[in-house]
Amino acid sequence: MLDELHIRGLGVIDEVSVPLAPGLTVVTGETGAGKTLVVAALELLRGARADGDQVRAGAERALVEARLAPPPPAAGDWLDEDDDALVVSRELTATAEGAVRSKARLGGRIAPVSALGETVGESIDVHAQSDQVRLGEEARQRALLDRIGGAPLAERLAAYREAYRVWREADAELAALRTDARERARELDRLRFELEEIDGVAPEAGEEEALDAELARLEHAAALTAAAEAAAEAVSGEGAARDALGSALGALRDVAGIDAELDALCERAEGLAAEAQDLGLALRRHAEAVELDPARLEQLRERKAALAGLCRKYGPDAAAVAAYAEQVRERLARLEGGEERAEQLAEEVERAARARDAAAQALTAARAEAGEHLSGQVEEHLADLAMGGARFHVALTPVEPGPTGADRVGFVLAANPGEPALPLAKAASGGERSRVALAVRLALADADDTPVLVFDEVDAGIGGAVATEVGRKLARLARGRQVLCVTHLAQLAAFADAHLVVRKATTDADRTRAEVSVLDDDSRVTELSRMLSGAVDSELATGHAAELLAAARQD
C-alpha cells in the first residue's frame, strides 16, 4: 500500500506531502483547487504519458515520489535484500520547445518509464471519470470482461491467440504461394540469379581478414624481401653485429675466472652472439621464402573485388552474404515446391483453423461464464444505487475470428422496466451511465485483489441517497486494502477513514499554489458543511454534516 505521496512542481502544486493510510481516504476541495493532481501524480507513477504542461510554471522540473509498503510483488529486481518498502519516483523536465523529458527511479535506481507500469501498475488501479465514455467502447468492454474472468479466462485467451497466430501465418504463406504465377516466376528468376552470383564466389565467413593479410604480403613482397636481406646483412654480415659480439667474447674470455661480475657479463655476451647468429639465419630464410607471384596477386585482387560486389548487394560482410544465400535457398525451395507445397499448406491451414475454432469456442464459453457473473454483480450494485429495475447483460455476438477471439463483446442495458435493452452508450442518461460505470468498477474490484484503488470523481451525476450508498460501498471495498477517492459529495466523504482537503493559497509573490491538509473530526464537519451548502458558517449545514459523520460511523 501507499505510505506517503510527495509532489513538487506539478500544476498548481508547489510542494506537498500527502500521508496515506489503509482504508478509505477521500480528497475534497473547491473546483480547480488541484484535487485531481493527486490522481495525476499516481498516474505518472504508474507510467502514464507525461505532458510538458504538467510542470508548474516557473519550476525547472516536477517530481512525484511515493513509498509502497510492502513492496509490490513485481519489485524484486529493484530491491535490496533487507528492503521492506519500494520508493518510486518520476521526474519531469519541460523543454523550451514545449516537450518534456521524463526520468523514473525504482528503489533509488534509474529505470525505464515502462518499468513503472510493470512494477507499480499492478498494485495501483486508477478509475477516472473519463471511463464513463470509454465504457461504451467495444475494446474497453472486452478488456473489462476478460479481466473479470481472471486466470482461467486469461489462459484460454492466451491459447486462442497462439492458435490464431499459427493459423494466420500458415494462411499468409498459402496466399503468397497462390499469388500471380508471373510474379512468382519473376521472383524465382531473381532468386536463382542471386544464388548463382553468390555461389560463383562462394564466400566464407571471416575470410576477409586472411585475404587482406595475404594481399598485403604479395603487394609488398619486394620491399619485404629487401628489408629482410638488409637486416640479415646488418646482423650477420661481415663486420656486422655478430662479428662485433665475437670480438667482445674473445676479449672477455681472456680474463675469465678472475672477476665474477665480468664472467656474468661474458655469459650475456655469449647469449647475444648466439641470438644474433639465429636472427641472421632466420632473416635470410624469410627473405628467401617471400614469394613474388603476380598471378596469385591478381587472383586475390579479383576475389576481393568479387566479395566487395557481393557485400554491396547482399550484406556488410562475407558471413552476412553466406547467411543471405541460405535464406534464398529456403525461399527457392518453398517456391519451387509449387503445388506440392501449396497442398501441404492447405492441409496445415485446415488443421490450424480447426484448432483456432476450438480455442475460440473455449474462449467464448469462458467469456459467457464471466459475463453472467459480471451481469449479476453489476445488477446487485445498480439496485443499491437506485436502479433496481435496471437489467444489465453482456452480449456475445459471433464474428469472424480475429486477434481477440470470435465474438464481439457488448454491454447492454435496459435502464428501466419495460424499456428495450440497448447498447450502453445509447441506453442510459449521463447519471445512469455514471452509476453503471461505478457498478462495473465495483464488480471489478470485487473480482481482484489490487491493493490500491483510486477513484477520480466517480460520483458525477449522482447525489442524495445514491451518494450515501456509493460511500458505503467504497468503505466496504476499502476493508483490507487502500481506496483513494476524489469527490464533491459530502454523503460519500462522510464514510472516509481519512479526509484530505486541497485548498488554494496565494504566496507573497502573488503565485497560486495548492495545499493539502489532513482534517480532524472538527475540521471534517466544517468541510462537509461547505460541501453541502457552499458555506462553512451555516448552522443547518453544520448540523447536517455532523449527522452524516455520525451515521457513517454507525454503518
Image (cartoon, rainbow, N blue to C red):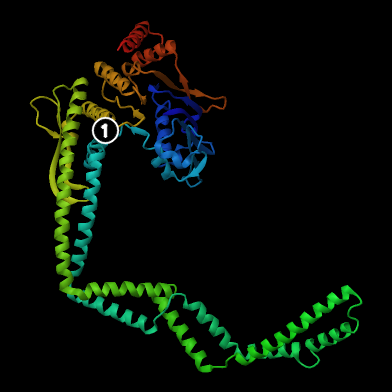
Going 77% across and 84% down the picture, which residue do you hit? 273
Viewer can see residue 227: no
Q: Position of residue 547 (x, y in %)?
A: 33, 8
Height in image: 177 above or below 499? Answer: below
- The residue that mark 1 highlights is 132
Q: Nearer the viewer, residue 313 or 79?
A: 79
Going 54% across and 93% down the picture, which residue do you hit? 293
Q: Nearer the viewer, residue 271 or 114?
A: 271
Q: Position of residue 254 (x, y in %)?
A: 90, 84
Q: Quadrant of residue 244?
A: bottom right
Height in image: 457 above or below 150? Answer: above
Q: Position of residue 267 (x, y in %)?
A: 81, 78
Going 24% across and 35% down the picture, which residue do you hit? 148
Viewer can see residue 57: yes
- Left or right: where 83 falls relative to 265: left
Q: Quadrant of residue 528?
A: top left
Q: Which quadrant holds the N terminus?
A: top left
Residue situated furthest left in the rendering = 418
Q: Secondary structure at mark 1?
A: helix
Height in image: 304 above or below 171? Answer: below
Q: Quadrant of residue 221?
A: bottom right
Q: Nearer the viewer, residue 499 or 475?
A: 475
Q: Position of residue 453 (x, y in %)?
A: 35, 29
Q: Nearer the viewer, residue 11 or 167?
A: 167
The amino acid type, in three-letter code, at marker 1 is Gln
- Left or right: where 87 falls relative to 130: right
Going 49% across and 86% down the picture, which residue do you hit? 301
Q: Which quadrant holds the C terminus?
A: top left
